Image: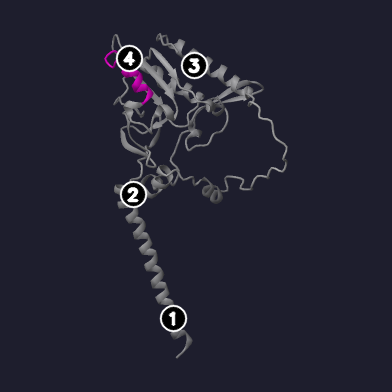
């Protein structure tokens, strides 16, 4: 009996066992996604985005449930105009006698993690009285002050607001002129600052879904691990794509205490604030709608 006649059946058996193991693992993962992560510990739904008429916002007419660990479970509703809101649509023609407020902001105003009627905009509307006032919110994650100006020009003032409220966080000025992390930030308006003055505006780039968007949107396993459990896979992406310098930072060798001082204000923030708020006021006064802010 030759050695080949003895080894060949063993190789076939090992190959068959390997195929069975791979198929079993695939079935187990599919079962995890189809059963466990849909009914027992469900993965969160992810709202889709769309670049419509030069503005990046959510794709219209979506409903879903956001989940973060075992701490947050909140429904979200995206209206016909692409904004998360309890209003099914935003009407441009304001009824006589109605007071209308537009609230512009980032993820805090978008309100993915809270019920629609618990958002700041809806609470303001409740306090003002829904029969006399409407509060429209226009917010999306990662937007900056420059993008708020873009919202104002392209959409907000078309709704004839009596009051515009701009909700800001500390990084809204920096991200108006500096690159920022995030999937959508390239599709937000920016400004150029050089020599202590604004030298121009950078129009938003049209947004297109990356090649893997369909996989991540439909995979319950991905949505569970990344968005419910908040696991950060950026390091893995960087290793594969070579997007980040992976060298470890040098260790601190000195034992001398370092004095703690207040951070210095980047002078570009002041330049950005003066320019952007100046443009906001120009837009508001130029419409002649009686809007104030």
Q: Is residue 141 magenta?
A: no
- Camera-nearest label, 3 or 2: 2
Quadrant housing residue 76: top left
Residue 179 percent coordinates (x, y)? 56, 33
At x 52% / y 48%, what residue is drawn?
Answer: 237
**Disc 3 secondary structure class:** helix
Q: Is residue 91 left or right of residue 211?
A: left
**Disc 1 secondary structure class:** helix
Q: Which mark is residue 280?
A: 3
Residue in front for this viewpoint, 78 or 124: 124
Q: Is tag 1's residue or tag 3's residue first in the polypeptide sequence?
A: 1
Residue 93 is at least partly visible in this image: no
Residue ID for mark 2 = 37
Q: Which mark is residue 8?
A: 1
Q: Which residues are magenta?
A: 119-132
For the C terminus, the quadrant is: top left
Distance between the alpha carbons at the discs numbered 4 and 1? 81 Å
Distance between the alpha carbons at the discs numbered 3 and 2? 45 Å
At x 57% / y 16%, what residue is drawn?
Answer: 274
Secondary structure that dominates the magenta span = helix
Q: Is tag 2's residue or tag 1's residue first in the polypeptide sequence?
A: 1
Q: Are marks 2 and 4 in contact (CB under 8 Å)?
A: no
Distance between the alpha carbons at the discs numbered 2 and 1? 42 Å
Distance between the alpha carbons at the discs numbered 3 and 4? 25 Å
At x 35% / y 18%, what residue is drawn?
Answer: 124
Q: Which mark is residue 128?
A: 4
Residue 231 is at least partly visible in this image: yes
Q: Is tag 3's residue or tag 4's residue first in the polypeptide sequence?
A: 4
Please, which residue is most extreme toward the left here?
131
């Amino acid at each position: 009996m030759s050695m080949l006649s003895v080894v060949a059946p063993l190789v076939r058996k090992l190959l068959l066992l390997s195929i069975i193991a791979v198929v079993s693992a695939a079935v187990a993962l599919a079962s995890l996604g189809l059963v466990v992560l849909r009914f027992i510990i469900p993965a969160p739904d992810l709202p889709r985005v769309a670049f419509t008429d030069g503005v990046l916002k959510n794709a219209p007419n979506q409903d879903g449930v956001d989940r973060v660990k075992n701490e947050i479970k909140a429904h979200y509703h995206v209206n016909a105009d692409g904004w998360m809101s309890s209003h099914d649509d935003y009407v441009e023609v304001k009824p006589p006698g109605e007071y209308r407020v537009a609230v512009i902001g980032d993820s805090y105003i978008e309100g993915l993690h809270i019920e629609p009627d618990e958002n700041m905009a809806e609470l303001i509307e409740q306090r003002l009285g829904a029969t006399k006032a409407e509060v429209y919110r226009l917010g999306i994650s990662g937007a900056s002050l420059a993008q708020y100006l873009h919202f104002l020009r392209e959409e907000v003032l078309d709704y004839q607001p009596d009051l515009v409220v701009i909700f800001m966080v500390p990084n809204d000025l920096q991200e108006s002129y500096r690159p920022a992390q995030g999937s959508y930030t390239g599709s937000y308006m920016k400004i150029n600052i050089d020599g202590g003055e604004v030298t121009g505006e950078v129009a938003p780039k049209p947004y297109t879904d990356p090649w893997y968007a369909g996989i991540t949107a439909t995979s319950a396993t991905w949505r569970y691990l990344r968005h419910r459990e908040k696991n950060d896979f950026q390091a893995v992406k960087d290793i594969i794509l070579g997007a980040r310098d992976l060298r470890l930072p040098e260790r601190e060798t000195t034992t001398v205490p370092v004095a703690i001082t207040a951070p210095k204000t980047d002078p570009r923030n002041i330049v950005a604030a003066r320019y952007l708020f100046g443009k906001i006021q120009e837009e508001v006064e130029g419409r002649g709608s009686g809007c104030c802010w």
